[in-house]
Image (cartoon, helix red, strand yellow):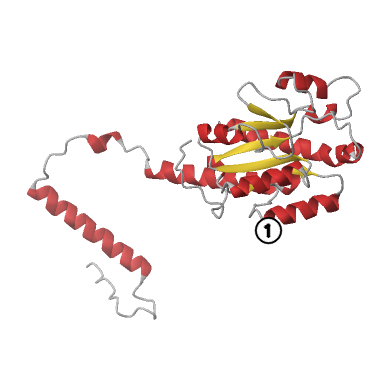
C-alpha cells in the first residue's frame, strides 16, 4: 500500500488505501453502564466481524486499539485473557473477533487510540491513508479517536452499524458529530460492502474486456493478397453492403423512396 504523503481530510474515503481500526471490542465491560452497552454492542460485533473478514480477504490492515484496563504489566494476550475470563460481562463480545495472526494491536492508556500510543508510526509504516473506525463506545473512545484522526487529515469512515454507545440516542449524536466535525462517512457496512464489491467487479470485467486474448491466427504472418483475391473480396463486401441497405431501407418502404429496387433478373 503506497503512501503518497498527500493525505487530505477532505478527500473521499478510499477503502483500498485504508486500515480497519477496531476500538475496545475486547472488553470486560465491568463499569457503570456496561450492561446497557453490551446490549447495544452485540449486533455491532457481528457487523464488525463481517467487515473484518472483508479487510482480511483483500490483504488490508486490521488494527486492534484496546484499553489496558489499568493492567500495566500485561501484554495484549494478557488483556484478552482478562476480558474473556469466566464471569466477565463482556466476554461474549470477543467471540468471533479475536485477532488473527496477521492483525496488529496497540494498547492505549486513555480514550483516543492516538493518545500516547505508537498508532501514528504504525499507520505510516503500513502506508495507510484512510481509516475505518468501529467499536465502542461511539460517544467516547470512537469519537475521540475520530477527532484525533481528523486533525491528522485521515479521510474517515465510521459506519453507523459498526459503533455502539450505551443508548441509541447517544450513538446517533456521536455519529452526527463525527459526520459534521470530522467529515466522516457514516454509511452502514451492509450498504458499503456490496457497493464496493460491485464496483470492483465492474472494474475487473472492464479490465478483462480490454485484455481479451486474441485468436492465435492474429499473430501469424500474413502474405499479401493477389489482385484476383482483392477484386473478389471487394465484390463480396459490396454485395454485403447492398444486402444490409436493402434490409434496413426496403424499396417498398414509403419512408425511404430514394432507395431503388433491384432490377428483376431475366
Q: Which residue is mark 1?
A: 180
Q: Residue at x 35, y 78 (%)?
A: 256
- Give percent across and percent down for residue 148: 64, 45
Which residue is at the front of the view, 115 or 83?
Answer: 115
Q: Quadrant of the C terminus?
A: bottom left
- Give percent across and percent down for residue 135: 74, 39
- Asked where in the image residue 225 lies, by quadrant, the reply is top left
Image vertical order of residue 140 relative to residue 261, above or below: above
> Callout 1: helix, strand or loop?
helix
Which residue is at the front of the view, 150 or 89?
Answer: 150
Would residue 37 be found to the left or right of residue 243 on screen? right
Residue 18 visible in the shown view: yes
Q: Residue at x 23, y 57 (%)?
A: 237
Q: Residue at x 32, y 38 (%)?
A: 214
Q: Residue at x 44, y 42 (%)?
A: 4
Would residue 201 be found to the left or right of residue 101 on screen? left
Would residue 39 be found to the left or right of residue 177 on screen? right
- Give percent across and percent down for residue 108: 70, 32
Amino acid at each position: 500500500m503506497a503512501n503518497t504523503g498527500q493525505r487530505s481530510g477532505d478527500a473521499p474515503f478510499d477503502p483500498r488505501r485504508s486500515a480497519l481500526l477496531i476500538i475496545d471490542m475486547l472488553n470486560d465491560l465491568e463499569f457503570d453502564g456496561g450492561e446497557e452497552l453490551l446490549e447495544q454492542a452485540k449486533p455491532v460485533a457481528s457487523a464488525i466481524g463481517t467487515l473484518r473478514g472483508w479487510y482480511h480477504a483483500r490483504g488490508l490492515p486490521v488494527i486492534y486499539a484496546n484499553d489496558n484496563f489499568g493492567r500495566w504489566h500485561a501484554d495484549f494476550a494478557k488483556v484478552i485473557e482478562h476480558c474473556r475470563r469466566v464471569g466477565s460481562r463482556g466476554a461474549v463480545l470477543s467471540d468471533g473477533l479475536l485477532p488473527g495472526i496477521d492483525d496488529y494491536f496497540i494498547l492505549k492508556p486513555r480514550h483516543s487510540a492516538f493518545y500516547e500510543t505508537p498508532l501514528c508510526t504504525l499507520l505510516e509504516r503500513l502506508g495507510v491513508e484512510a481509516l475505518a473506525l468501529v467499536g465502542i463506545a461511539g460517544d467516547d473512545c470512537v469519537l475521540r479517536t475520530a477527532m484525533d484522526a481528523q486533525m491528522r487529515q485521515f479521510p474517515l469512515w465510521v459506519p453507523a452499524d459498526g459503533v455502539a454507545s450505551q443508548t441509541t440516542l447517544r450513538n446517533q449524536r456521536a455519529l452526527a458529530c463525527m459526520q459534521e466535525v470530522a467529515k466522516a462517512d457514516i454509511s452502514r457496512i451492509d450498504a458499503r460492502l456490496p457497493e464496493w464489491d460491485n464496483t470492483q467487479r465492474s472494474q475487473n470485467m472492464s479490465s478483462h474486456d480490454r485484455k481479451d486474448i486474441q485468436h492465435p491466427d492474429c499473430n501469424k504472418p500474413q502474405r499479401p493478397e493477389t489482385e484476383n483475391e482483392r477484386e473478389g473480396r471487394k465484390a463480396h463486401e459490396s454485395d454485403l453492403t447492398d444486402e444490409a441497405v436493402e434490409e434496413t431501407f426496403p424499396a417498398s418502404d414509403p419512408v425511404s423512396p430514394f432507395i431503388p429496387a433491384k432490377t428483376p433478373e431475366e
